[in-house]
Amino acid sequence: MTTSNTESQEVRASSNFLRDIIAEDVRTKKFGDAVIQTRFPPEPNGYLHIGHAKAIVLDFGLADEFGGKTNLRFDDTNPEKEETEYVESIQADVRWLGFEWEKLRYASDYFGQLYEWALALIKAGKAYVDDLTAEEIRQYRGTLTEPGRDSPYRNRAIEENLDLFTRMKAGEFPDGSRVLRAKIDMASPNLNLRDPVMYRILHAAHHRTGDAWCIYPMYDFAHGQSDSIERVTHSMCTLEFADHQPLYRWYIEQLGIFPSVQIEFDRLNLTYTLLSKRKLLQLVEEGHVRGWDDPRMPTLSGIRRRGFTPEAIRAFVASVGATRTNGIVDIEMLEHFQRDDLNRRAARAMAVLRPLKLVIDNYPEGQEETVAVLNNPEDLSEGTRLVPFSRELWIEQDDFRETPPPKYYRLSPGREVRLRNAYFVTAQSVVRDAAGNVVEVHCTYDPKSRGGNSPDGRKVKSTIHWVSKAHALSAEVRLYEKLFSKPDPGDVEEGKTFLDNLNPNSLEVVSEAKLEPSLGSAQPGERFQFERVGYFCVDPDSTPGKLVFNRTLALKDSWAKIEKKAGG
RNA sequence: UGGGCGAUCGUUCAAUGGUAGGACAAUGCCCUUUGGAGGCAUUUAUCCAGGUUCGAAUCCUGGUCGCCCAGCCA
């Protein structure tokens, strides 16, 4: 899956219990000569998010490590929630992450087989049609501490069950009027074994099978058998399904089919991030974000648009690993892997987000020149480019202080700094607007410092970036902060909701950023490091005349830390 | 209060009866034509109580704490 080249850059996958189990099963030939087979089984009822990336990397990555195969299987047993739109976005997201499935399957491919198996269970006296209402079934189920009671329909004759179930399938009964149940144990301490529902009546159009069916299997009656049909050896899922494992095994054993084994691992949780489909849907529907692919969303389509890379996500997930303990990973960890990846690969460019005019008084009026600039100091093979320089420049407002605080090394009156790749300049005076704000800084330059070094060996403490005013391109730049202001967005006081934890400053639009002209040819999806500012990528909203950039992540800002500490 | 699962630096993952280690974060220093990157250093952990053992994070017993389960969702 990965070349040896990128592999050395990705985090060495440390051992984890899933890998250990598979390695042991291979060693003992638990599945004979069968290849390791896994599957990634999303329900197509929403967009994939960073949490799914963990499952994808585990399912595909582990199979690949052992020379096995992975299927993409849509768990589409509930027609009321599922849509083709999601089927498509999920495939795109899996591919984007860098994985290709062996077979594309749907649980709905197996509806016929599942129905036959249900019939077999009825004939074996292991399943029955129940006429109780949903509410009655709930009451008969008992509670966590009290056993359930048998349904009055539990001991129906096999012939009657067969007749009723056949007629359920034929559409003779309305939704909710009857269900097919497995006859297991109403007193089991595991509620999943208290005669679980196998089939329910749903007169709903299915995104693939249309009106062919009006009874649909429950997750439990579909998942294990689907695994078995596909000869899945290791069926990895998240911890909350652990209680379902006895039922998973029960169906497989009763049916005498290929013994797929379920193994559970912990879900991924991130600070400042919500991964609940329901809540993400609410953010989209109520317009708190601009859509499923809003760059602030934790969806794969969102973080892709934001500029995150599949390489970084894979490395992150590998580093986080898999265990059976549920925790919460610092979002900084994800950000670290993303910066690490982009630092090595992103082309550099100069861009000024909040422009302040800098005039070089002793630079000849009308003169211009070009300076050679490294495209990526981390990768010299990326070469250089020419950037125009002239008498009037844009610099960052943050890079000038009329009265510099302690430890501030950037431009201030009388202080000399380096213009990146160009000249040393010394600030001389300022021009103010009516309100007294500095709107222009005048400086002088040292012509002998071309390229950024003075022949007399004189040092400057700071280097700032710039864009030639006459050559600058304007662009819209969207700056993102965390979507939520609390590490745990679900932590809410009485009477409040997670929406109250939304960060009101999660999006800031800079409409007139100034860019060096080489950026004019940037295409949507292209990623850059704007030197000293952060990592940015071109948003698909860009048009030929107007570029739009998303800030993927800011660069680490140690000055901000110093300033914050000094300011209390 | 039934059942299942779990507990190691602030966070995360290792250590599979034999020196508790890595990454993130934090702090300090060095270096730097990005206050980026890089380098060096430092701080902090085996839930508790017993037991087995020459030796326990690891095995056993008992506690404690946390998560999951009472959909005709997945």
Image: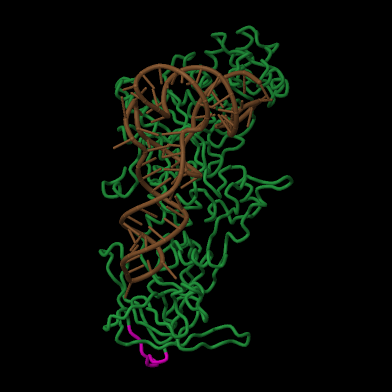
Query: What is the quadrant of residue A483 in the picture?
Result: bottom right
Q: State whether the magenta stretch is mostly helix, strand or loop.
A: loop
Residue A507 shown in magenta: no
Verify whether residue A364 appears in magenta. yes
Does A503 sit above or below residue A380? above
**Residue range corresponding to the magenta coloring:** A361-369
Q: Quadrant of the N terminus of chain A?
A: top left
Residue at 31% x, 45% y is A2
A535 lies above or below A272? below
Q: Report which colour depicts chain A.
A: green
Dividing the image into 4 quarters, which one contains the C terminus of chain A? bottom right
Res. A166 image quadrant = top right
- Chain B appears in which tint? brown
Horizontal side of residue A352 vs A378, given as left or right? right
Residue A283 spot, x, y in % from top left:
62, 50
Tell me where residue A180 appears, x and y as whole percent: 62, 18
Q: Position of residue A9 (x, y in %)?
A: 31, 50
Residue A78, can we see it?
no
Q: Residue at x 43, y 36 (%)?
A: A322
